[in-house]
Image: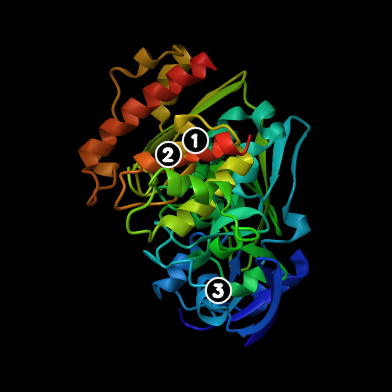
Amino acid sequence: MFEFNYLQAKSLSEAATFVAAHPDAKLLAGGMTLLPTLKQRLAQPSHLVDIGGLPELRGIEVKDGKLALGAATRHHEVAASAVVRQALPALAYLAEQIGDPQVRNRGTIGGSVANNDPAADYPAAVLALGATIVTTRREIAADDFFQGLFSTALKDGEIVVRLLFPLPQRAAYVKFPHPASGYAMTGVFVATTKTSIRVAVTGAGPGVFRWSAAESALAKKLDPSALDGLAVNAADMNEDFHATREYRANLVKVMAKRAVQKLLAS
Amino acid sequence: MTKIELTVNGKQYSREVEGRTLLVDLIRDQLGLTGTHVGCDTSQCGCCTVHVNGRAIKSCTMLAVQANGAEVVTIEGMAQNGKLHPVQQAFTDCHALQCGFCTPGMIMAVAALLKDNPHPSDEEIYHGLEGNLCRCTGYINIVKAVKQAAQTAR
């Protein structure tokens, strides 16, 4: 890595002030994406501001019909939490599928969401559940937050503090993991409320997206067969060493059907 | 340079490190505990697995400064008073290693798995060891060792 100055933030406001004053500083929480990036010399921050231990970024609680997760909550904590398993089991399940046990002991939900890796799992849940991203400056709706490849609505120096997930009626997540890396080649999160159904897809495109045609079809008939005549546009899917765009387009449909099946069984 | 203090295998250490010094490099180069290995250096293989404050982590993907004030256990800290830890004993009994390069990290991961889940099913064992790659054994004897260690700890 290139050398940098490391500081452990003593408070959220100290961290926010510091990163605002130092545009080349980067925030460090779990480090499961940032540290490998730095090891490959793909970034050269002047400072790393460690916010992973800040009490203001911790907490798991259900309040006013929403599950609130502090941004520095580790994946294994979400997966193991009795609160999450009771209120939003699909989210606990999703967290358990991220990476591997060692990665889950360090990685955080705030880091995952702020980074917006196209193959990350959490963005699918955030988008399908219509979550709110609470930052040091404002609250951002999920539909406005994800803006494409590694890109979010966060401004320079803005820090994710908490995620608020409205509790769905039912929800399910199904992922087709890459056999070696475990990243989602396609992951589909489906959630129903009294008035709506949302289908969010990760891993297949340049960023997480809602499959609107599937949502309309499922609103009429909540069954995997409702997706029979549908397809996502292969031209919009990622193509790489692991899979063609046609393969991913097909995976989206298969995983969406499985997610609906799983939701019905939940 | 930053001064950090940490406990490793029950012993307190104070060392100067750069911000970018990896925990695995502190452990191996500065503390001389070379049982922890660097395999892939890209957070996949798990050969670098140690316990930090009771949780299994990949020490090639953690900065030494992040371990300031922490309790670290490495493979050298598993045997107690000359007696092998049940997981180590099980690995020996079940021939769960060949070249041995992945073994320290594998043992640390298994010990952590059994702490969270003392009687894992086969599927739970496979899931629990997803962060550790072995090129020699095909994992069969490793799984046997996990089951034996689970029995022994009862």
In the image: residue A238, left or right of residue A2: left
As drawn, B69 above or below A207: below
Query: Label 1: which residue?
Result: B147
The earlier-in-sequence mark between 1 and 3 is 3
Q: CA distance from mark 2 to mark 3?
A: 28 Å
Kind of residue at badge 2? Val
Question: How far across and down, in percent of the image, does residue B17 sit?
Answer: 60, 83
Secondary structure under the numbered disc 2 in the rendered image: helix
Q: Is residue A127 visible?
A: no
- Answer whether labels 2 and 3 touch (C-beta < 8 Å): no
Label 1 packing within 10 angstroms: few (<14), some (14-19), many (20+): many
Indicate the secondary structure of the residue bearing disc 1: helix
| Circles 1, 3 touching at the beta carbon (< 8 Å) | no
- The residue sitting at 28% across, 47% down in the picture is A238
Quarter the C terminus of chain A occupies: top right
Q: Chain of mark 3?
A: B
Residue A86 image label: none
**Drawn side of residue A251 relative to residue B26, left or right:** left
In front of the other: A12 or B80: B80
Host chain of mark 1? B
Rendered view: B89 above or below B12: above
The reply to whether residue A72 is visible in this rendering is yes
Please say which color scheme the image uses: rainbow
Picture residue at 68% right of the left edge, 26% below the top: A86
Residue holding disc 2: B143
Give the x, y percent position of residue A88: 63, 29
Q: Both on one chain, marks 1 and 3?
A: yes
Quarter of the figure that contains the N terminus of chain A: bottom left
Amino acid type shown at disc 3 = Ile
The residue that mark 3 highlights is B27
